[in-house]
Amino acid sequence: MMAMVGDSGDEVVGRIICETYGSDLGPQQPFPNNCVLCKRCGKWVGNDGKAQMRKLRIRVRG
């Protein structure tokens, strides 16, 4: 789900909305592969508002 909000009517900014809880997660990200973490459900959400599978890579020094 995606909502469009304009500040003064001249510029329209896309917003990222979590499809699970409907939380507003902020403006759309400039790159298509960027995701935003929804703190309510703990899922990564893409620009299209759908949950994305993310694997965190943790490097261990040593």
Image (cartoon, rainbow, N blue to C red):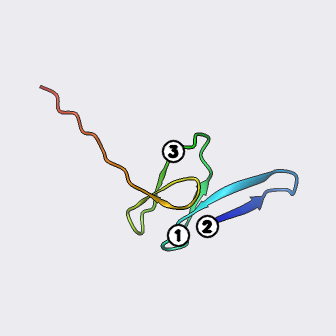
Q: Is residue 14 above or below residue 1?
A: above
* Residue sitting at x 22%, y 33%: 59
10 Å crowding of disc 3: few (<14), some (14-19), many (20+): few
Question: Mark 3 is on which residue type?
Answer: Asn
Secondary structure beneath disc 1? loop
Residue 13: percent from the left, percent from the top? 73, 53
Secondary structure under tag 2 reads: loop
- Looking at the image, tell me whether mark 2 or mark 1 is earlier in sequence order: 2
Which of the two discs, 1 and 3, labels the residue nearer the N terminus? 1
- Residue 43 image offset from top left, x and y in percent: 40, 61
Residue 19, numbered label:
1
Residue farthest to the right?
10
Are the residues at dot 1 and dot 3 in contact (C-beta closer than 8 Å)?
no
The x and y percentages for residue 45 are 49, 57
Q: Are marks 2 and 1 in contact (CB under 8 Å)?
A: yes
Q: Disc 1 marks which amino acid?
A: Glu
Numbered label attached to residue 34: 3
For the residues labelled 1 and 3, the Cα–Cα distance comes to: 17 Å
Q: Residue at x 37, y 63 (%)?
A: 42
From the viewer's perspective, is 39 left or right of 34?
Answer: left
Q: What is the quadrant of the C terminus in the image?
A: top left
Kindly indicate the quadrant of the structure image that contains residue 37. Answer: bottom left
Which residue sits at x=30%, y=45%? 56
Q: Which mark is residue 1?
A: 2
Amino acid type of the residue tagged 2 in the rendering: Met
Depth order, front residue of 51/5: 51
